[in-house]
Each structure stands twice: as C-alpha cells, then as structure tokens.
Image (cartoon, helix red, strand yellow):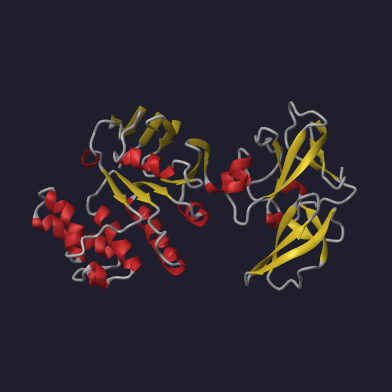
Amino acid sequence: MADVVLKNVRKSFGKAHVIHGVDLDIKDGEFIVFVGPSGCGKSTLLRLIAGLEDISAGDLMIGNERVNDLPPAKRGIAMVFQSYALYPHMNVYDNMAFGLELAKSSKSEIDAKVREAARMLQIETLLDRKPKQLSGGQRQRVAIGRAIVRDPKVFLFDEPLSNLDAALRVQTRIEIAKLHTDTGATMIYVTHDQVEAMTLADRIVVLNAGRIEQVGTPLELYHHPANLFVAGFLGSPQMNFIESEVVQAGADGVQVRLPNGSTISVPVAGDGVKPGETATLGIRPDHVEVSPQGSLSGQIELVEELGENHLLYVDAGHGNRMTVRMPGDADMKAGSEVTLALSRESCHLFRQTGEALPSLSRATSPAPSSPRLTSSAA
C-alpha cells in the first residue's frame, strides 16, 4: 500500500491546458473519489496517475517514489475501466490469471490468488465460464478480480459502474466498499454519480475545468461547500439559489433582502461584506417547508412522486424556482399556491465571486427544529 502525492501536476495537449497545477495528498489506505462535470479533467487526472498519459509538469509520487517516468506496469497500480476489457476466448479463471502468468508467477501462487479473489467477489462458481456467459455485473466483478490478484499498491477505478443497471450498481458498490475494508488498499475512483461519491469516499475531490475546487469528507462538502460551484454540484436535487442584496453585516451574521422584499439574517461571518453588495443565498430542498408563516410564496409547477418522499417545484417569482422535499404522503397538487419557509440556520451565503461566507454556528447535521424564516425576519 502507498501514499499518492501530486505536486503542481499539469497536463497539456498541445496548446490546450487541461490540468492546471493540481496539488493533492492521498494517504495510504484512503478511498478518494474524483467528481466533477464532463470535461473537468477527472479521468485525465486518473490516467496521469496510472501512467497512461504523460505528465506535462509537476511531480507524481507513489509510496515516496517519483514515478513520472515509470511505465504503468512499474508503478504498482491496477486499473478497472468502465469497459470490462475481458478476453472473450478465455474463461474467468484465465482472465484473472493472465497478468500473473505474464509476470512469471508460479502456478500455485496464481491459483491461490485467483481463488481468493473469486471468494472475495463471490464468483467462485463462475471460474469456468466465458465472458459472454456472464451478466454485466459479473463481468465487472471479474475485471475487479483481475486487479485484486496483482496485489497493487493503488487501485484506480474509472467509472466502473456506469454500464450497470440501478440494482447492479448498488450491489457492486457494496462489493467495492467491502473490498476496500478487506484489503485496506489505497483507492482512487472516478465517477459522475454523486451517490457513489457520497457513499464510497473517505474524501471527495471536486474538480472543475482542470482545477480542484474543494477536497473534504462527503459531509464536509455537503454541509460546508467552499463556493457556489461545489454547492450546486453536490446534492440531489440541487441546492436552491436566490439572488439577494446585503442589508447589513455584523458579528451575529449577514442580513440580506430577498427579491420579494422580505429579509433574513444568515449566521455567517460578514467580514468585508458591505451593504448593497449582491449575494446569493443557498438552501437545500430538505431545509425548505410549506408553512403559512413562510415569507416566499409561489405556485407549484410540478410534483414528483418518489414514494418515501416527493419533490415540489415551485415558481417563487422573480425568476426563482424553488425545490422542496416533502414526506411522501403530503397532499400537494400542481397549480396550488403555497407559502415557503426557510431554515435560517441551514442557509448558506455566497459573495459575488462565488466564495462561501464561513458559517458561525452551523452544525455538521442541522437540527430539524431550526428556526424558520418569516416575513418579519430580521
């Protein structure tokens, strides 16, 4: 096992700069997930670590060794791709054993490693089958098993579950989490799926246009996003954003005026914030409720029934569409007029630059009894 350290890593394809000075310290045994929109550089960064692309500038260290110039086979890594890349003419056993055979391992060592990996992944009964006889989930487990037998220092996963249906994604995600627990290996995982990121990661790296926006635990990023980009990217459905105007800033928070004229005092540090400045108030759908004491009103455009809960999409006027998560048995109809209240303690505030103002008191998990915004809020 090994630490992975990136120091001012850059990547250019000709004149196109795609990775811009990334610094990242991944500890031995960590499960790190790279997330970001399409084209943000997450797969490119993974390929730089794997040695499948050359680093244009900077240093990559694996286990205290600079590996910029080492070929992939010498880096002590194993990679699992989105495509299974299994040899169709070989059975499962031979697909898993092939890399060890190339490395001239003994037959007894190969057999022991293949069967142990098959046991871990619960594919012992599939060892004699060809890939065409397997389901998508089984093929992906074989691809993971092929990586396990190499006993790598670092596992690299490039969107390994994106070809699977919903049920298989859940099952395979659990198996990958168990694999991390059982092996204690360093794992770096690329995905566009927020659920995968939130449930698997020790820490998440949010990338945007080849730069790191924020690194932190799933709950740190969810409850304390560093900027508007992270706040809008993490969380499903997306955080609600309301363009507001700063009324005053003091030691107990920043008071802002919403587009309908009501005000709310957000418990964030207001150092350097001036009255009249434009700010963006953010609040997640879980922290908005339908209440006659609320200060925002609007018409329900759509109700999405999800069983255990449902989502209301409310036109709150002034170009604002609010999303509200409610219990599944709530009786709401499209076209109805509603009044919305916001949990003051759960609000975020972002400056015009996109930077989040630091919270003064928000706990990691906001209390359900947080006070609500009303039309007289100050």
Q: Position of residue 271 (x, y in %)?
A: 73, 27
Q: Is residue 68 above or below residue 220?
A: above
Q: Position of residue 360 (x, y in %)?
A: 71, 37
In the picture, which quadrant includes the C terminus?
top right
**Residue occupying image coordinates x 82% and y 59%:** 298
Quick check: 245 left or right of 48? Answer: right
Q: Residue 219: in sight, yes or no?
A: yes
Where is 148 relative to 5, above or below?
below
What is the quadrant of the N terminus in the image?
top left
Residue 255 vertical position relative to residue 365 in the rendered view, above or below: above
Which residue is painted at 23% across and 37% down in the image? Answer: 71
- Position of 210 with respect to 28 (left or right) is right
Q: Nearer the viewer, residue 15 or 208?
A: 15
Quarter of image, res 266: top right
Q: Could you say which quadrant of the image residue 329 lies in?
A: bottom right
Residue at image location 44% in from the left, 41% down from the top: 41
Tell me if residue 273 comes above or below residue 181 in the rendering. above
Q: Please tell me which residue lies in front, 85 or 91.
A: 85
Please name whichever residue, 125 or 87, is drawn nearer the observer in this view of the structure: 87
Q: Position of residue 364 (x, y in %)?
A: 63, 47
Q: Is residue 124 left or right of residue 285?
A: left
Point 73% across, 41% down: residue: 280
Can residue 368 be seen at all in this image of the molecule? no
